[in-house]
Image: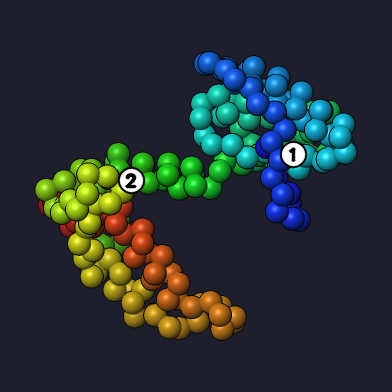
Amino acid sequence: GLHGVTNSYKVPCAYYFTKQLSGRDLFAWTKEVIAAVESCGFLIVRIVTDNYSANVTMFTHMGNGNLSTVVTHPHDPNRVIFLSFDPCHVLKNVRSQFLERELHVLERDNIVKGKALCSKQMEVEDADAEELALSVPQEVLADLENLKGQLCDPSPSVTYCHAVCHVRRLSRWWIHREARQ
C-alpha cells in the first residue's frame, strides 16, 4: 500500500494472491508496481517490508546483489529508493535472538538468558507467552532508577524516566542471571 510521508493517508495499490512467491518474482512485481504508481504522479521514496526471506531476497536484487538501505531507483538512475524493514519486525527479531542465545554482559560478568531458557523461574499467569510474568531483579534497573527525573538532553520534556519506563516494559522479555562459574 501507499503511505504518505508528510500526511497520514494509506491506499492499497495492488493485491497479489500468491503461494510460495520467490524473491526474484517479488522483485519483478515490485518494479512493475513502482512504475505503475509513479505513472499516476506519486514518487516512491521508501519501501518497507517485514523480513520474510522473499522480501530480503527482493531487497538484495534491488541492490544488485547487495542488501543495502539505499538503492538506485529501478526506473530512474538519478534517484534513489530507501529500503527498510518494519521496525516492529526488527524488534521482534532482536527479541527472538535474545531468546535463542545466551548473551554475556562483559562489564558485570553476567549472562542474560531468554525467558524460554529459564522456564523454572517464571510464574505463568496466562498460556500466552507474551503474558508471562517475570520478577525483575532490581540490579537490572538500578542504574537507570538512580537517574530517574534527570534530564538526558537540554529539552526539559525528555527525562530518564522515559528510559526507565521503557526498560521496565521490555524487561518482561528477559531474565537476568549471574553467570555460572
Q: Which of marks 1 and 2 is nearer the N terminus?
A: 1
Q: Which mark is residue 173?
A: none
Dot 2 surroundings within 10 Å: few (below 14), some, or many (20 or more)?
some
Which residue was labeled with disc 1? 81
Is label 1 in a helix, a strand or a loop?
Answer: strand
Please determine whether, in this image, residue 154 is positioned above or below residue 19. Answer: below
Q: Where residue 161 sits: x, y (%)? A: 42, 76
Identify residue type, mark 2. Answer: Phe
Please determine whether, in this image, residue 33 is positioned above or below residue 100. Answer: above
Q: In which quarter of the image is the N terminus?
A: top right
Q: Is residue 65 visible?
A: no
Q: Which residue is drawn at 30% across and 69% down?
A: 141
Q: Where residue 179 sits: x, y (%)? A: 18, 53
Q: Which mark is residue 98?
A: 2
Q: Where residue 89 sits: x, y (%)? A: 48, 42
Is label 2 in a helix, a strand or a loop?
Answer: helix
Please determine whether, in this image, residue 90 is positioned above or below residue 77. Answer: below
Q: Where residue 59 sits: x, y (%)? A: 63, 30
Please determine whether, in this image, residue 31 is positioned above or below residue 128. Answer: above
Q: How was the colour assigned to the protein in this rendering?
A: rainbow
Count every numbered label the image shows and give the total. Answer: 2
Q: In which quarter of the image is residue 164?
A: bottom left
Residues under numbered marks 1 and 2 in contact, where contact means CB atoms less than 8 Å apart: no
Residues at marks 1 and 2, CA–CA distance in whole angstroms: 31 Å
Q: Residue at x 36, y 58 (%)?
A: 170
Out of 166 and 103, give the one closest to the viewer.
166
Dot 1 surroundings within 10 Å: few (below 14), some, or many (20 or more)?
some
Identify residue type, mark 1. Answer: Ile
Q: Which residue is drawn at 70% across and 28% down?
A: 14
Q: Which residue is drawn at 33% across and 45% down?
A: 98
Q: Is residue 58 visible?
A: yes
